[in-house]
Amino acid sequence: METHTSLKAVVLPWLAMGHLIPFLELSKCLAKKGIKVYFITTPKNIARLPKIPLDLSSNLSLISSPLPHLEGVPNEAESSMDVPPTMQPKLKMRFDLLRDCTAGLLEDLRPDWVIYDFTSHWIPSLSAKVGASCAYLALFNAASLTYLGPPCELIGNYRSTPEDFAVVPRWVPMEMESKITYHLHEVVKLLHSVDEDMGTPDTVRFGSSIEGCDFVCIRSAYEFESKWLELLSKLYGKSIIPIGFLFPNFDEFDGGEKWVLLESWLDKQEKDSVLYVALGSESPPSQEELTELAHGLEHSNLPFLLVLRDLPGSTRFVLDMLPNGFLDRVSDRGLVHFGWAPQVKILSHPSIGGFLTHCGWNSVIEGLGLGRVLVLFPIMNEQGLVARMVAGKRLGVEVARDEPDGSLRWESVTKAIRLAMVEKEGEELRANARKMKVDFATSSQNHCIGAKEGKMTASLDKVDDTERNQQNKQGQLGCPTGGACLWLSALVSLASTGY
Ligand SMILES: O=c1ccn([C@@H]2O[C@H](COP(=O)(O)OP(=O)(O)O[C@H]3O[C@H](CO)[C@@H](O)[C@H](O)[C@H]3O)[C@@H](O)[C@H]2O)c(=O)[nH]1
């Protein structure tokens, strides 16, 4: 195995479980390659992460960086799952207060590379000060990122009305025949959640992160969305490295006592019979959504495992938001789990057949990576775009909502669940999803077939630095300069050879 013992990388994810987990997976890959990795996050988030495998602990250090206080954010809130959606922008402002402390750490650690998330769009200038190169790790898929647009569009915020967002963007060529766009009601909801006084908008964070980096790593693969990856590279004017799906190793997750109970219930169910229902870490359903979801599950007459968490900052228990008598009526075939659930372990159980998901990219990867057919139930962020992409690939079915207001009826929930899980017309979806397990497994093993099959790997070793720089300027190769290429080639070889 090729190793890179002299290289150091600092990794700085956003404070959200859906970001901490894949950043940690990438860190583990790099540590396996002999790169010394410093993973920076807050104390509470460190405690939430799976244990670092012993054989990697000498190369992978978790650095605890306490969050400074910010008025209006509870001191104990260290992750997006600790605050309601309305407080997310404030949590980002609190995260921005880590800038000085991060600058100090970079001075001390003197890394070759910094790998950062969209929230820390201030990393490129800090990296430059210590002579480090930087890579932005994008955790959306390429189709969604393409829809969001190039950095100038994101920073300029040129799309301003809901209607602007409900059409396929002008930079997506007609021949792509894309149907990936937001529904009007999704945009209205998104725009309502943006408060002008809440610091740097997400669009600017995304745009500046893309603009400032030496290259973009993306959690996807060429086999899955080659056309989107190619278009995105053109749009960004720099190359992007699809690093594969970073599928988490579920053996490393300690399910604890919760898992013992869940497993014993799952063991009693028939193979492929149970629908797993979970809505991620930061997308709480509204009262209307939860009511209709519960009635939809009830009327489906199928076994299910529903995961719910209390809304952060709310005085109301989520249990009290369920319809009266629901738990009793479904007790013979449904289990409701309250609190954080060992999701990857659950999804890997043979009795799980399908996954009703909010379409967070991690959940979609985890569901498809285990061959589960998806029932697509987007709630916020880019999730509507993910739902349309996955439905377009015939890997799942989206729960229909009423236009124009996006209201939900339990009948649509029941219909989508039954189609995906048992109806004859859903057989193609189930077969396609099962096949994805094989595709994702191969891709995870190889850690980014995309890069292997793409132009990057081939080009890298053949061009010298001058040529690279020229190509880089033209946006053809996107290879960072000088010694940085060493690290990049480590990443690319990691991508192409697996570990
Ligand atoms: O009870 C739980 C809840 C979540 N998870 C894990 O937490 C992660 C959740 O990630 P994801 O499914 O992507 O959901 P969110 O964290 O809610 O997603 C945020 O981050 C994603 C990646 O950027 C975006 O696609 C979403 O829109 C955004 O809301 C996954 O690994 C889950 O396995 C658990 O293990 N147990």
Image (tube, helix red, strand yellow):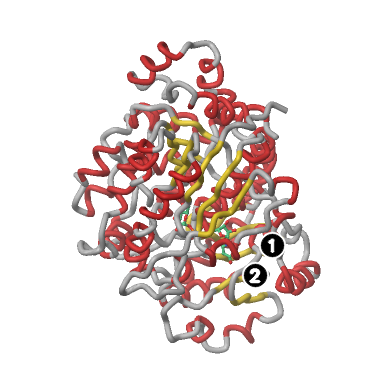
12 relative position to 259: left or right: left
Front residue of 278/175: it is: 278
Distance between the alpha carbons at the discs numbered 1 and 2: 9 Å
Q: Which mark is residue 108?
A: none
Mark 1 vs mark 2: in front: 1
SS under mark 1:
helix
Q: Which residue is mark 1?
A: 346
Is residue 200 depicted above or below 80 in this figure? Answer: above
User: Mark 2: is the Cβ under 8 angstroms from ligand 1?
Assistant: no
Where's residue 171, x and y in %?
Answer: 29, 33
Please state which of residues 352 and 308 is positioned toward the viewer in this rendering: 308
State whether residue 264 is above or below residue 349: below
> Label 2, on which residue?
305
Contact check, label 1 and label 2, Cβ < 8 Å: yes
Mark 2 belongs to which amino acid? Leu
Q: Residue 63's quadrant in the figure? A: bottom right
Which of 404 and 25 lies nearest the eye of the viewer?
25
Furthest residue in direction front, as rendered: 108
Q: Earlier in the sequence, mark 1 or mark 2?
A: 2
Q: Position of residue 274 (x, y in %)?
A: 68, 64
Residue occupying the point 57% across, 33% down: 7
Q: Considering depth in this image, is 67 or 53 the residue closer to the camera?
A: 67
Task: Kindly tell me whether residue 91 is visible in this rendering.
Answer: yes
Identity of the residue drawn at 50% across and 66% down:
413
Q: Is mark 1 within 8 Å of ligand 1?
A: no
